[in-house]
Image (cartoon, helix red, strand yellow):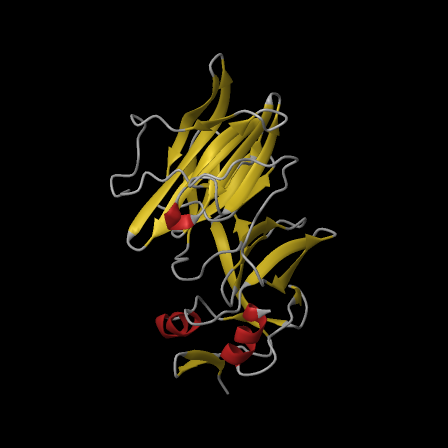
Amino acid sequence: MLLISVAVAVLGSAPPSGGPLDSAAWTVRLGQPSAVERQCTDYSQLFWSVSLDNGAARATRLVSREHVDPLPFDYPRHRDREGDRRVARVDDGWLVGFNAGEFGGGLWWFDRGGRNGRRIRPSSSLPTNPADIFHAENVLGLPLVGGVRLVLMGLDHLTGRSGRVFRAVSGPHGWELAPVAVLDAQPDVWVVDGSKLLFLTESGLWSTDAVGAQRIHDVDFGGLAPTSLIRAADGPVYVGLRYYVLKLVEGRNGWEESWLVPGECQRVQLKDYQCECAP
């Protein structure tokens, strides 16, 4: 309930309720948010989560960013087994990834009953971004792409940026991590798109086929805190953000952007460190 009450104060009225993104509840603004608008929405506590309803895109207000996948057993607490939890069932048990932000995280294997576990770590000899001061092992996703289990690791904290993609490989000595790509920042949110994975870093939209990764569209997501990523049945990609929803349509010459805002609050202004609807 805290985020709901804060959103009311920030917007200065009842918070927008969201709904289908092709409805009159949403307005397409002209161009990307300006620097002044971004400064305002940096103070907004209104976050949108995008999802599919019978193949159509809709957005709802996000009241919690916690993500904890279920597990059929408990495990002893550990400093790198806290925070968000991502779970993937594998032949010999479970892969479980943890992300507690700047407080740590890691990838673990547990047997089927959870009685035995082992930390799975990237080799220190594997490449990283030259500007990566963390070499973070926080797990942000365990998607299955074309039959390959990927592990998304990274951490954006203060001025540090860490992001890597690995393949989880089962070998004679247990599960190991094989490198796929080094990123410029953490892979924030993702969606499996056929035989590829679409994901975001703060510099834009990326794609990987479990062999390599490339940025396919540049967008500055800095400060916009992506919450979710979907691809609608008719093709567009939608990104849930702080205050905005971004629609991306793929064409022959790249991706076309449409920035969506709630119809009842199309313009904002910063007043006494609160982001309010502007007249």
Q: Measured from the top left, where is residue 247 in percent x and y? A: 55, 58
Image position of 47 with respect to 111: above or below: below
Q: Residue furthest top?
A: 172
Q: Measured from the top left, where is residue 115 in percent x and y? A: 58, 26
Q: In which quadrant of the rendered view does residue 181 lie? A: top left
Asked whether 44 or 247 is in front, the reply is 44
Q: In which quadrant of the rendered view does residue 158 lie? A: bottom left
> How many numbered dots are placed on residues in this image?
0
Q: Measured from the top left, where is residue 138 in percent x and y? A: 42, 41
Q: Name the residue rendered at 64%, 68% in the picture.
A: 18
Residue 209 seen by the camera: no
Q: Measured from the top left, where is residue 44 in percent x and y? A: 47, 71
Image position of 81 with respect to 101: above or below: above
Horizontal relation, residue 234 to residue 273: left or right:
right
Query: Which quarter of the image is occupied by the N terminus?
Result: bottom right
Residue 32 seen by the camera: yes
Q: Name the residue rendered at 43%, 69% in the picture.
A: 33
Q: Name the residue rendered at 40%, 62% in the picture.
A: 223
